[in-house]
Image (cartoon, rainbow, N blue to C red):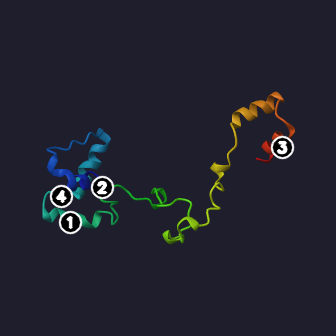
Amino acid sequence: TVRRFLEIHGETLEKVVFAVSDLEEATYQKLLPLYFPRSLEEEIRCLPYLPADIGNAEGEPVVPERQIRISEKPGLPDDASDEEGLEADLSFIGSHAFARMEGDVDKQRRLILQGQLSEAALQKQHQR
């Protein structure tokens, strides 16, 4: 990550300091030449030891399952086109679980415990 950052923004920095413990120092001394070679010969010698996937442009690891995906029109099927305009089927509106939420669950639970909730509301709560 530091190397990728320096590749992009290195000209704006004068110095990078790694603050490591005594236990970590030996590891950093061994691995720093891999990522910051001091010569072309050292770079060529270290290439086989570097991982093939070194992340995104910033050097950060990329885990597809953790990527945020933002769709242009959330809720619309992928095959819906802009040509349909206002005539598109909007039956999906209100079908999401969040759209069906009703009332304050904590307040309803308190009323149940106090015996103040109607039988119909009690059944609905039980079904939920």
Mark in front: 3 vs 1:
3
Circle 4 Cα neighbour tier, 10 Å, few/some/many (<14 / 14–19 / ≥20): some
Which amino acid type is marked by label 2? Glu
- Residue at 33% from the left image edge and 60% from the top image edge: 56
Q: Which mark is residue 127?
A: none
Circle 2 Cα neighbour tier, 10 Å, few/some/many (<14 / 14–19 / ≥20): some
Relative to 26, residue 52 above or below:
below
Mark in front: 2 vs 1:
2
* Mark 2 vs 3, N-terminal side: 2
Instruction: Give the Cα distance between marks 2 and 3.
Output: 54 Å
Instruction: Give the Cα distance between marks 3 and 1.
Output: 72 Å
Mark in front: 3 vs 4:
3
Relative to 67, residue 111 above or below:
above
Which amino acid type is marked by label 4? Pro
Q: Quadrant of residue 35?
A: bottom left
Which amino acid type is marked by label 3? Gln
* Mark 3 vs 4, N-terminal side: 4
Instruction: Give the Cα distance between marks 4 and 1.
Output: 9 Å
Disc 2 target residue: 58
Toward the top, the furthest residue is 114
Q: Secondary structure at mark 4?
A: loop
Q: Which mark is residue 37?
A: 4
* Mark 3 vs 1, N-terminal side: 1
Instruction: Give the Cα distance between marks 2 and 1.
Output: 24 Å
* Mark 4 vs 1, N-terminal side: 4
Q: Quadrant of residue 60?
A: bottom left
Circle 1 Cα neighbour tier, 10 Å, few/some/many (<14 / 14–19 / ≥20): few
Disc 3 target residue: 123
Mark in front: 2 vs 3:
3
Q: How many marks?
A: 4
Disc 1 target residue: 45
Circle 3 Cα neighbour tier, 10 Å, few/some/many (<14 / 14–19 / ≥20): few
